[in-house]
Amino acid sequence: MSFDRTIKIAPSILSADFANFGAEIQAIEAQGADWVHVDVMDGHFVPNLTFGPPAVKAFRPHVKTVMDVHLMITPVDPYIQAYADAGADILTAHVEAGPHTHRTLQAIRAAGMKAGVALNPGTPAEAVEHLLDLTDLVCVMTVNPGFGGQKFIDMTGKVRKVRQMIGDRPVHIEIDGGVDPKTAPLVAAAGADVLVAGSAVFKGGSVSTPQVYGDNIRAVRAAAEDALS
Ligand code: DX5
Ligand code: ZN
């Protein structure tokens, strides 16, 4: 995985057909997805439950781009090796998930993955200031994690701060929650490069009408890129 700050669209398969993940992943990649975003929830850190390492392992052969695994679980550390074995390229943990995020990020890298750190809307940018040399991605949540299809919470000021703190480091800024063609320009202009979008990508389409996914991906990308030109 080489580093660049061009806009990348990462559809969240939380909005896909849960009975058909393989075909859904193939469809979004064929329609221009840059990364595939996989939301892992434990019914404890967040009030919803999705899937664990065996499911993520089953997704792996279908993902030809980058498998971006977002852990909304606590604790994290006991499961890091299982997600490495499942084939995650990027493993993101929440800074709120435990007292030792520094150790968690070291362990994720030691297991051979890129390490991401996510911030809930109520958590300030400064929470990642001393983690930036250990991380490959800062995920700024623009909804309270747990569900797809929620309303975007404006975190533009936080994104700007994180961008400034990152400086020249090769660290991505990812935005997760409520990203659509209206909100994408705000976060792109503030310095984000990875845009997670669940409902905005999957709405109106299916594996039998995948061109809708393509139109939706292009709409988010074009809106974000316009904000940079
Ligand atoms: C929220 C998840 C998101 C979610 C985004 O807890 O982390 O990745 O699927 O969905 P939308 O784009 O519908 O807000
Ligand atoms: Zn997510």
Image: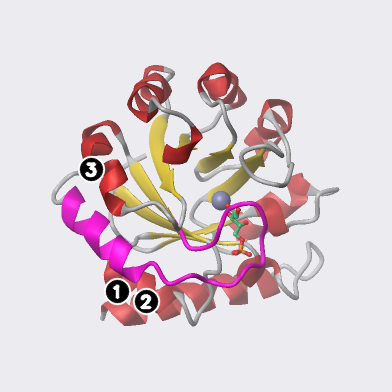
| Circle 2 Cα neighbour tier, 10 Å, few/some/many (<14 / 14–19 / ≥20) | many
User: In which quadrant will I find the N terminus?
Assistant: top left
Q: Is residue 29 left or right of residue 167?
A: right
User: Residue under circle 1?
Assistant: 189
Instruction: State which tag comes first along the sequence, 2 or 3.
Output: 3
Vertical relation: 218 (above or below) 197? below
- Where residue 118 sits in the image (x, y, percent)? 43, 45
- Where residue 23 sits in the image (x, y, percent)? 76, 50
User: In which quadrant will I find the C terminus?
Assistant: bottom left
Tell me which segment is drawn in magenta. Answer: 141-166
User: Residue under circle 3?
Assistant: 129
**Could you tell me which secondary element the residue under label 3 belongs to?**
helix
| Circle 3 Cα neighbour tier, 10 Å, few/some/many (<14 / 14–19 / ≥20) | few
* Residue visible at 39% across and 51% down in the picture: 123
Res 162 quadrant in image: bottom left
Q: Is residue 87 left or right of residue 93?
A: right
Q: Which mark is residue 186?
A: 2
147 or 192: which is nearer to us? 147
Magenta stretch containing residue 224, yes or no? no
